[in-house]
Amino acid sequence: MTAPETPGLKELLARARAPSEEIAAALDEDQEPETEEPLGWQPIWKRPRTPKSKADRKKELRDQRERLQDAGKRRLAASQSRRPRSPQSRIGNAAARRDARALSRVRHSNAWLW
């Protein structure tokens, strides 16, 4: 049994370089489109920027301000509607309060991670 013939070095190089020209042509073709061609769909980061008019910008800011003000009103209404705490809840065993405070400090720290 004989070994299959191995192609020469020059043949291998030629075979390897052949697709690279096609790839280069395809890449060049995809770069900047000509101005006469219709653009079609493009991702947003490749689209040319269209400057907004001053009126559009002001309208956008007005809408944003309105949204933020509405959110603030909702937040305020939500905080005020909470059930008021009785003053009795603040009067209690001082030692128990100290323990609870220490426990909450430990719970809110990352002490157990060391």
Image (cartoon, rainbow, N blue to C red):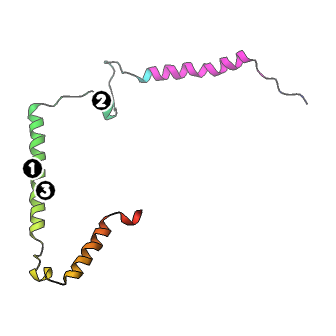
Return the residue at label 2. Answer: 47
Q: At label 3, which amino acid type do we have?
A: Ala
Asked if residue 58 lies in the magenta stretch, the reply is no
SS at mark 2?
A: loop
Between disc 2 and disc 3, the foreground one is: 3
Residue 87: quarter of image: bottom left
Residue extending furthest toward the right: 1
Circle 1 packing at 10 Å, graded few (<14), some (14-19), many (20+), is few
Residue 88: quarter of image: bottom left
Asked if 21 appears above or below 95 in the picture, the reply is: above
Q: At label 1, which amino acid type do we have?
A: Glu
The Cα–Cα distance between marks 2 and 3, rounded to whole angstroms, is 33 Å
Disc with the residue nearer the chain's start (1 vs 3): 1
Q: Quadrant of the C terminus?
A: bottom left
On the image, the x and y values in percent for residue 82 come to: 12, 72
Which portion, as a residue range, is magenta? 6-28
Which residue is found at the position 23% from the left and 81% from the top? 95
Residue 75 left/right relative to 10:
left
Residue toward you, 108 or 14:
108
Asked if 73 appears above or below 59 in the picture, the reply is: below
Residue 51 left/right relative to 109:
left
Which residue is found at the position 11% from the left and 61% from the top? 74
Residue 33 left/right relative to 28:
left
Q: Which mark is residue 71?
A: 3
Q: Which mark is residue 66?
A: 1
